[in-house]
Amino acid sequence: MSALAALDDWPVENVAGAVITASGDITVHGDADRPYELASVTKLLVAEAVLVAVEEGAIDLDDPAGPPGSTVAHLLAHASGLAFGTRDVEAPVGTARIYSSAGFEVLAETVEQATEIAFPDYLAGAVCEPLGLTGTALEGPAGHGAVSTVADLAAFAAELLAPTVLSAGLAARATTVNFPGLDGFVPGYGKHRPNDWGLGFEIRGHKSPHWTGTTNSPSTFGHFGQAGTFLWVDPELGAAGVVLTDRRFGPWAKSLWSGFNDSVVAELSAGR
């Protein structure tokens, strides 16, 4: 995977990445065991844990959570109307895609109340232990407070390509559009009409500009973080990409990420 070599030229102090294929191949570049702050890539791990709680019957996607009229599913899909960083209500439930880290804190509390297990411990038992994610931990808020490694996120991406922790049906629902037609902002990339989202997983759709590649399929799902991190899974390509850095997201990232992801897609497509 020669495309990964381009990471050496990025204007960051530390970087590591991986490309994962549905056949089980994982190609790593850089120190795969170095811990990085994930920022909002945390939401993918948290969403997976919430969905495990759904599978276990501890909670239900239709359970009330958040502002009146909102459910667990609304919170996961950023359709509850909650503000980004507070629990203020900015829109009626189901009318706009308001990206809300605060909503993920409500989700963590909902799981805690239902299971009587502290959410960081629930995440560890529900997601990290089954997948062998030994370098991953939730050390702060559920919306943005996890630390992990490329090795762990590559294993997590492989799980997303071929689910074993979740049933096929729930995994499919989580990674396709929920509450379709809602407009909203992707932080750093402006307003999109529509701003498609699954249950915790952003859906690429036809958004432009976007942090994934211009050649990633519309069904691509994942997340990026303000810590300079991203993880995407492209079901049509049968592959996933992970990059972690220690430089905060900014113009440097917008100019590199999409082109890098296009080069990964091109190399994988050529190798078919």
Image (spheres, rainbow, N blue to C red):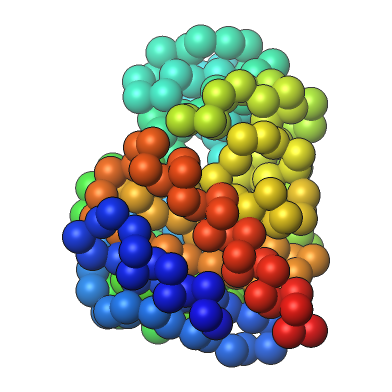
Q: Position of residue 57 (x, y in %)?
A: 60, 58
Q: Is residue 194 left or right of residue 154?
A: right
Q: Residue at x 59, y 89 (%)?
A: 25
Mark yes or no: residue 191 visible: yes
Q: Nearer the viewer, residue 132 or 19?
A: 19
Q: Position of residue 73 (x, y in %)?
A: 63, 39
Mark yes or no: residue 165 visible: no
Q: Residue at x 68, y 30 (%)?
A: 195
Q: Is residue 221 left or right of residue 114?
A: right
Kindly indicate the quadrant of the structure image that contains residue 32: bottom left
The quadrant of the rendering that contains the C terminus is: bottom right
Q: Position of residue 56 (x, y in %)?
A: 58, 64
Q: Residue at x 35, y 37 (%)?
A: 250
The quadrant of the rendering that contains the N terminus is: bottom right
Q: Is residue 12 left or right of residue 223?
A: left
Q: Position of residue 126 (x, y in %)?
A: 45, 69
Which residue reaches farthest front?
9
Residue 149 in the image: above or below residue 225: below
Kindly indicate the quadrant of the structure image that contains residue 76: top right
Q: How many marks?
A: 0
Residue 78 in the image: above or below residue 132: above
Q: Nearer the viewer, residue 24 or 72?
A: 24
